[in-house]
Image (cartoon, coloured by chain):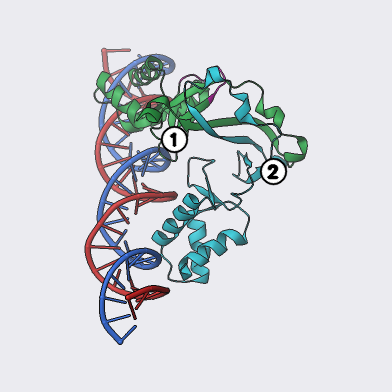
Chain colours: A green, B cyan, C red, D blue
Amino acid sequence: MTAQRRVVAEVLDGEHVHLTADEVHARAVAKLPEISRATVYNTLGELVTLGEVLEVSTDQRAKRYDPNAHRPHHHLVCARCGAIRDVHPSGNPLADLPDSERFGFTVSDVEVTYRGVCPNCAAA
Amino acid sequence: MTAQRRVVAEVLDGEHVHLTADEVHARAVAKLPEISRATVYNTLGELVTLGEVLEVSTDQRAKRYDPNAHRPHHHLVCARCGAIRDVHPSGNPLADLPDSERFGFTVSDVEVTYRGVCPNCAAA
DNA sequence: CATTTGACTTGGACTGAGTCCAATGTAGGA
DNA sequence: TCCTACATTGGACTCAGTCCAAGTCAAATG
């Protein structure tokens, strides 16, 4: 556990929003000016493999990092501004995939992304 | 409707798999050697806005294009080799998102991505 | 205490996917 | 046929992310 890793963890823990790697880097630099992009990527990658943080790619641009990895959830994304909210649908979509639609796969996970327009963008 | 656009449409229609833009380009070049990448991107973009083709981004790499836009469906992705199958879960996940979890959004769409290991990769 | 070791960090080069743009080509109407 | 608007081209550019060789640091060893 080095200073750099602590800073990255603090950034993610501090704001419960979904930051891109570059945003994490920018906030990390504010606390530890000489931290490099590569280290931020390395640390984020480790946090992901440790299961502390989730990678989310709701648009086709930069991946975002979700510190809320321990509570399973899905995402609701604004198609205009890109805002992301965590949501907890009722029901288990995994159970909605019948065997006949599994093609022999061992299905272990499901991601659900709802898309719509947020109140802010709807008002504008 | 130019020769270039016809070729792109033919490529997508010919193989019901999920090609990347570069794969579409490669196959288009086979039929019309001097077609450029930019034209393929332009045409794919138009097909997407016309609703003829869907953009799918199951991994964080290249977008893939799904010619099966008229029949709603979701995707099952192999975590190892990236193979993609179209699937039709029972139930409607949109209905699973209660109003209390909509945060004032006008929710219009939902994408579901199942992840697992395909029979081929499981055997290897 | 000095040295070795191995892991961590750095910055810069590199890659892949996609976009942008000025120049060129072309289809189809007047 | 000529014009005009639109489509195409290719190359430069951007953005996100990866890679790598070199440098740093701390803890363990002698």
| Amino acid at dot 2 | Ala
Report in which chain the residue with disc 2 lies: B
Residue A36 in the image: x percent, y percent? 30, 30
Which secondary structure, mark 1? loop
Residue at the spot 43% in from the left edge and 67% down from the top edge = B35
Magenta stretch encompasses residue A70: yes
Residue at the disc numbered 1: A79
What stretch of residues is rendered in magenta?
Answer: A67-74
Report in which chain the residue with disc 1 lies: A
Residue B60 in the image: x percent, y percent? 48, 40
Residue at the disc numbered 2: B124
Residue most extreme to the right: A100
Label drawn at residue B23: none
Q: Are marks 1 and 2 in one subunit? A: no
Camera sees residue B60: yes
Camera sees residue A20: no
Magenta stretch mostly in which secondary structure? loop
Quick check: A95 left or right of D7? Answer: right
Q: Is residue C12 above or below residue B92?
A: below
| Amino acid at dot 1 | Ala
Q: Nearer the viewer, residue B55 or B58?
A: B55
Residue at the spot 51% in from the left edge and 66% down from the top edge = B6
